[in-house]
Amino acid sequence: MNAPVSAAASVCRFASKEGKDGPLCHCTGVSEAAVRGAIDFRGVSSVEEVVATTGAGSGCRACHCRIQRVLNGLPAQCGGRFDWCHECSCIRAVCRCEAA
């Protein structure tokens, strides 16, 4: 059974209010758009440069796979264990909602 978003958010400490369009990096709150901007307008071309320029990826590093996808011209979401839960917008690896 899927938990409603509001119920999941109260259980999962990483849940985002933005839903599945939330931040690319949960630790710093940096969005996919900010990372794309750094790539397009500042010439950033590596995960390390994204970390230095935007701060994304400077915490737990679970978003490094999403950052690399954006660097490769792909959408950040990949469906892997470090992607977002579609119910509570938490990182699946640490999600505690009933949908996980």
Image: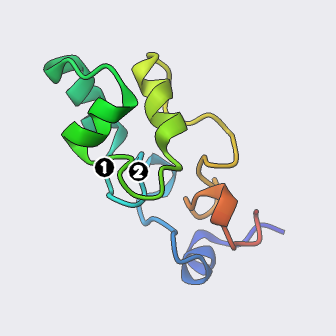
> In the rendered view, does 86 fall on the left or right side of 3?
left
Vertical side of 95 occupied by 76: above or below = above
Q: Which residue is mark 1?
A: 30
In percent of width and height, residue 8 lies at: 62, 75
- Looking at the rendering, which quadrant does residue 4 occupy? bottom right
Q: Which residue is mark 2?
A: 25
In percent of width and height, residue 51 lies at: 30, 41
Vertical side of 6 occupied by 55: above or below = above
Residue at horizontal 62%, vertical 49%?
82
Q: Secondary structure at mark 2?
A: loop
Q: Residues within 10 Å of mark 1 (few under 14, many from 20)?
A: some
Circles 2 and 1 in contact, beta carbons < 8 Å: yes
Residue at horizontal 42%, vertical 45%?
24
Outermost residue toward the right? Answer: 1
Q: Which mark is residue 100?
A: none
Q: Residues within 10 Å of mark 2 (few under 14, many from 20)?
A: many
Outermost residue toward the bottom? Answer: 10
Residue at horizontal 31%, vertical 19%?
45
Q: Secondary structure at mark 1?
A: loop
> In the rendered view, does 94 fall on the left or right side of 63?
right
> In the rendered view, does 42 fall on the left or right side of 54?
left
> In the rendered view, does 13 fall on the left or right side of 98?
left
In percent of width and height, residue 88 lies at: 59, 64
In percent of width and height, residue 38 lies at: 21, 29
Vertical side of 82 occupied by 66: above or below = above
Residue at horizontal 59%, vertical 57%?
91
User: Alpha carbon of mark 2 to alpha carbon of mark 1: how far?
Assistant: 5 Å
Amino acid type shown at disc 1 = Val
Amino acid type shown at disc 2 = Cys
Quadrant into which the C terminus falls: bottom right
